[in-house]
Image (spheres, rainbow, N blue to C red):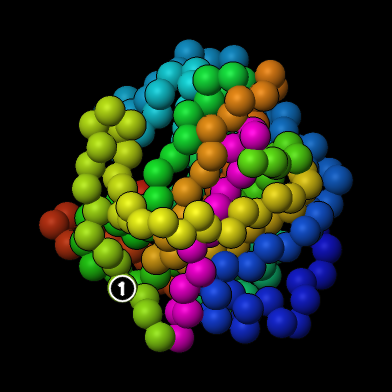
Amino acid sequence: MKSIPASTRDTYLSTGYVVLRDLLADNELADLQEVCDSLLMEPPDDDNGGKSHDIGRGHDRRFLRHRHEDQPALRDFVLGAQMKRLASTFVGGHPHLFNEQFVVKGPKTGASFAWHQDSAYVGFAHEPYVTLWMALDDTTVENGAVFILPRDLNEDRSIVAHLWDSEGKELVGYSGDHPGEPALVSAGSVVAFSSVTLHRSSANVTDRPRRGFIAQYSSEPILDPKTGKPKTFAKPL
């Protein structure tokens, strides 16, 4: 992994996100691509066996979730020293792995994803965490780029009201006119945004899949107040 600019944290706090172009080393990118492609050979499981939000849409929009424990290369990456260094930039010196998943939009029919905050899917009060969205393919508006609605995290870390769209199988937290700022990046780039930053993604209308990987890190374990257990993971790096 390449070095992180000194201004990264300040940019993240003032706009709610930062784009780190070509950050991953070649071997890191190749490992993620290989794991993703191997998991794509498995049948779609939209709700992770009933354990996750049912937001997948089969081959149209696939979420390949929580596989670092049985994929050594993925485990070493998400729990490794380089990711600790990166995550610490945003959540402080003791990051915990909260969640990880590949997101793949199928060719031609790859669904868009509506405006939302990742924190809206947690379901209870928690400290904002960071989402590290990693491009495994060059991203364009045509193949499913991420769009960001800037937010000054120094002033506002609130979670807005979201409505469930049963047809799109997703929460929707914004329906205004702002188009958002597209993160048009090459494979190996990372888009880091807060879990309270509104974002969306466009549909994939190209003839190739668009692959991405998400790793999310919190400053402390995110525990469900009803059970006292982690919402997903709470693994210290």
Q: Quadrant of residue 71?
A: top right
The quadrant of the image that shows the N terminus is: bottom right
Provide the residue designation for mark 1.
158
The answer to whether any part of residue 96 appears in the image is no
Left or right? Give the position of 184 relative to 158.
Answer: right
Secondary structure of residue under mark 1: loop
Q: Quadrant of the C terminus?
A: bottom right
In the image, which residues are magenta?
A: 142-154
Of 96 and 63, the residue lying toward us: 63
Please tell me which residue is depicted at 71% across the width and 82% down the height of the picture: 7
* Residue 146 located within the stretch drawn in magenta: yes
Q: Who's the residue at 41% across and 56% down the image?
A: 177
User: Which quarter of the picture shows residue 140?
Assistant: top right
Residue 54 relative to residue 69: left or right: left
Please identify the quarter of the rendering in which residue 50 is found: top left
Which residue appears farthest toward the front when viewing the image? 177
- At horizontal 44% and vertical 40% (from top left) the residue drawn is 113
Q: Looking at the picture, does residue 110 appear above or below residue 192?
A: above
- Let me know if residue 189 appears in the view: yes
Q: In the rendering, at what x and y percent does residue 158 appear?
A: 31, 73
- Residue at 59% of width from left, 19% of height from top? 108
Query: Residue 134 location in percent, x, y?
Result: 65, 49
Would you say residue 229 sits in the magenta stretch?
A: no
Residue type pointed to by label 1: Ser
Residue 232 is left or right of residue 141, and the answer is left
**Within 10 angstroms of label 1, few (less than 14), some, or many (20 or more) residues?**
few
Q: Nearer the viewer, residue 197 or 5?
A: 197
Q: Is residue 169 above or below residue 99?
A: above
* x, y percent for residue 116: 37, 53
91 versus 214 height, above or below: below
Q: Main secondary structure of the magenta part?
A: loop
